[in-house]
Amino acid sequence: MGVIGKLFYYKKKGNLKRLKKWEGELNKCIRCGYCYELCPLFKSQNWESDTPRGKLMLIYGMISGEIEPNQQIVEKLFQCFYCKNCSDNCSAGVPVTDILTDARADLIEAGFDVEGTIVNINEDLCSVCGVCVPVCKYDALSIEKVGKDENKIVVDKIECRGCGLCVAACPSGAISQKEGCEVTLPELHKKVTDLLKENKDMKAIVFCCNWSLFPGMQLSESPTLVKTNYGLIVSMCSGRVAPELVLNAIEEGAWGVMVAGCPPEECDHDGNYKTRRRLVLLRNMLKELNIEPERIKLDWFSTKESAKLTKSIDDFVKKLEKLGPIKKMEESKKIGG
């Protein structure tokens, strides 16, 4: 029996009950499209099927029998960062992310196996050190025994929220996400490089948390903003800003790097605590290289504090202008011994 056959077998047996119970909620969606403006995934993909509204229509089609799901459709349903901007701002009160979670469970049970925005473990690189397990607030990672003396890291594809904190925390680079949604480390590296190459007057790179300020600041713009003296890149969480991203920006010519995140008590992923620890270590590293540690800045902002963010960035840029450009990393290493 193929995957589609499996799905409809489950439906006939009544085993799509997780999705079926949401039929009334799905009917509440008035198709207004306001969720478009708030969805970070839609900003990078620009497809109707990547919007919360589009996903709800696909799900309704599946439970009504009007749509036969295939791998491509299911892949769309598994692409979500669970920022909850759609659910929190839906005028009809549709609990979009709760519905998507149940869709994941039913589709996995039906035999589908997709990536979406879920993290992937490269077992050839993974040392099973376990660093990633406590990093995940959603218990989506666990250590599983697969032999007498062998363990492996297992990903719960239903619980994974795609925040990427484990990607930034993995010391061996064994955890990754599928490229294409502008959130992977290579994609963020490319954004940094492109911004600095195209804007010679740029002094600072600012990583801004998607969950806190960005949706309210620039509803219709892409997740990369270019100002005259700084570039703003949206990250799915401040905890996703890995040390190599900061060092990459400095090596590429940035005079400094700022990370703007949610206040610690407001972070959905507890990523800001991890960011704070990393940036303390990075500042110490800069000292060893004879580079001013104040070239790295961390600040917290709530959702309605866009004016505070703008002032904080302006103050940071002014400080960088006083400090001047950074000496080449090679020279700093020589000076530092």
Image: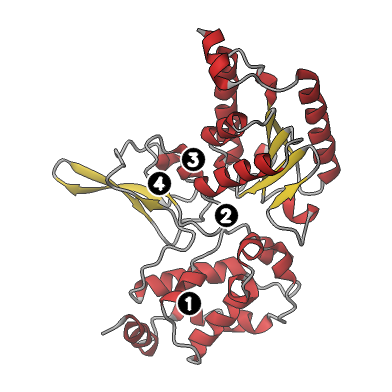
Q: Which residue does the numbered mark 2 point to in the structure image?
A: 182
At 56% across and 21% down in the image, what residue appears? 329
Instruction: Give residue 110's position: percent from left, percent from top.
Output: 35, 77
- Report how far apart the C-alphas of labels 3 and 4 lie in the structure: 8 Å
Indicate which disc, 1 or 4, sits on the residue closer to the N terminus.
Answer: 1
Q: Which residue does the numbered mark 1 point to in the structure image?
A: 73
Amino acid found under the numbered disc labelled 1: Ile
Q: Which residue does the numbered mark 3 point to in the structure image?
A: 168
Residue 114: which quarter of the image?
bottom left
Q: Is residue 287 left or right of residue 1?
A: right
**Residue 207 visible to an observer of this rendering:** no
Amino acid found under the numbered disc labelled 3: Ala
Instruction: Give residue 130's position: percent from left, percent from top.
Output: 35, 38
**CB under 8 Å between discs 3 and 4:** no
Indicate which disc, 3 or 4, sits on the residue closer to the N terminus.
Answer: 3
Amino acid found under the numbered disc labelled 2: Glu
